[in-house]
Amino acid sequence: MQENDEQQRKVAGVVKWFDGSKGFGFLTDPDGGADILLHANVLRNFGQSSVAEGSHVTAIVQQTPRGMQAVEVLSIEPPASEPMPAIADLCSATPAEVALLPLLPARVKWFDKAKGFGFANVFGEKADVFLHIEVLRHSGFADLAVGEAIALRVVDGRRGKMAAQILSWERAMIESRTVQSGGAAALAKLRLVAGAV
């Protein structure tokens, strides 16, 4: 074991703020210490380019000359909020119904945080899937990067396909293994796509 490994500890903090353009943000220390730096590279190693304020993050942290920093993200849970965002196209779908939808592997085509929307391409499908900023927030993201690998639960909205839930690639892999019936098939599809893109 290396010396710095002994200084590492596991914490479950809350995202105070995260700015993708600056490349960092901070978690609160559950033990009441100074805020914990969360660098964009550490977040990207987990499979996300951003994280929403108020999200619960479990991470391995380590003391550095600049203060406490996250060195590995273990899990991210979206912030507590209403069960579904207030989007007219999604009002008819309950959270339980959304959870039963299959996870579809996708890549972000583009997303404009200022406009509050963007689009993703689902592997093997031609139609774009609409991504709304409120669905993003309820899914634990603050922003999405072009080309970012994600998984979507998609509903048919009045104007076409739209995401009802967005998951990081890693979280989708875990859910595919544990929650969904046919998880092995979904997991195999996610792995196939990961190797192809």
Image (cartoon, rainbow, N blue to C red):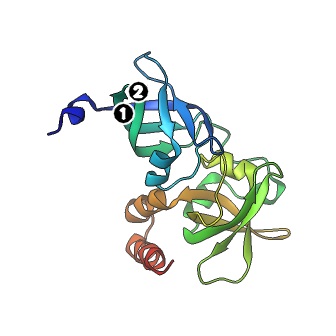
At label 1, which amino acid type do we have? Val
**How many neighbours does mark 2 have within 10 angstroms: few (below 14), some (14-19), or many (20 or more)?**
many
Position of residue 191 measured from the top left corner of the image (x, y, whole percent): 42, 74
Q: Amino acid at mark 2?
A: Met
Q: Where the N terminus falls, by quadrant?
A: top left
Corner quadrant of residue 124: bottom right
Mark 2 to mark 1 CA distance (whole Å): 7 Å
**Residue that extends furthest to the front in the rendered view of this protein:** 65
Residue 68 disc label: 2
Task: Kindly identify which numbered label has been placed on residue 149.
Answer: none
The reply to whether callout 2 and callout 1 are in contact (CB within 8 Å) is yes
Circle number at residue 61: 1
Tell me where residue 65 appears, x and y as whole percent: 38, 25
Residue 10, horizontal then vertical, whole percent: 32, 33
Q: Classify 110 as above or below 24.
A: below
Residue at 43%, 69% (x, y): give it. 181
